[in-house]
Image (cartoon, rainbow, N blue to C red):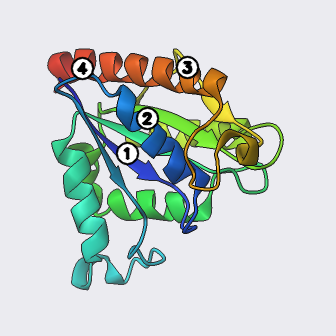
Amino acid sequence: MAHIVAIAGSLRQRSFNHALLRAMQPFVPDGSKLEIHTLRGIPVYDQDREQSDYPEAAARLKDAIAHGDGLLLASPEYNHALPGPLKNAIDWLSRPPGDRARVFAGRPVGLVGVTPGRGGTRFAQAAWAPVFQALRLLPWYDQQLYLDDARKLFDEDLSLVEPRVRDLVRGYVEGLFAFCDRYSRTTR
């Protein structure tokens, strides 16, 4: 079964995107794993640090992704684009260039997002497409999950309370794990 490394793309303590990843946990197929990571401890990318002082938090995350069968990004949307903190982490994870293939090439990737505003995270999701292409990731586009009005979907404890959305989350998780399981066997 598949092991997917998930990254919550927000630094907020009460991140809706982190809550969305947690809401996916009950739907992970038996024998599979959804390992959730945060961006905490990853500094702003600085090429001068790349060789002499590579951040430990980025190294741990890079190794986790390299040992998984797939990747899932829970990406917020800031100003109709992808969020700086998550893009920054991806920039660290793709360095040095010789590591890029080990971490990303041919790896299945899913993309979800939730925002308190209107329109969901569809602009951010579109903005990730060229990044995925550059990293040679294998995106799963069979189902999209970009949610809006997050304050109505989650309660005060950041538990998903909207039944209709819970069904969408279940379907997304089942589809993504099937995709990762299928492609991790044939391409890796």
Seen at 58% across and 63% down, the residue is 14
Seen at 20% across and 21% down, the residue is 187
* Earlier sequence position, callout 3 versus callout 2: 2
Residue 121 image offset from top left, x and y in percent: 69, 40
* Earlier sequence position, callout 3 versus callout 1: 1
Q: Mark 1 points at which residue?
A: 6
Lateral position of residue 11 relative to residue 58, left or right: right
Question: Do tag 1 and tag 2 residues touch (Cβ < 8 Å)?
Answer: yes
Helix, strand or loop for disc 3: helix
- Compare residues 135 and 145 and report the one nearer the observer: 145
* Earlier sequence position, callout 4 versus callout 3: 3
Amino acid type indicated by mark 2: Met
Q: Quadrant of residue 93?
A: bottom left
Residue 122 image offset from top left, x and y in percent: 71, 35
Quadrant holding the N terminus: top left
Amino acid type indicated by mark 4: Asp
Distance CA(mark 4)–CA(mark 3): 21 Å
* Earlier sequence position, callout 4 versus callout 2: 2
Residue 98 visible in rendering: no
Amino acid type indicated by mark 1: Ala
Q: Mark 4 points at which residue?
A: 181
- Compare residues 144 and 45 and report the one nearer the observer: 144
- Numbered badge on residue 176: none
Structural crowding at the residue carrying mark 1, measured as other residues with C-alpha within 10 Å and reported as few (<14), some (14–19) or many (≥20): many
Give the number of the mark in front: 1 or 2: 2
Q: Name the residue under label 2.
A: 24
Lateral position of residue 12 relative to residue 64, left or right: right
- Numbered badge on residue 167: 3
Distance CA(mark 3)–CA(mark 2): 10 Å
Above or below residue 134? Residue 60 is below
Helix, strand or loop for disc 4: helix
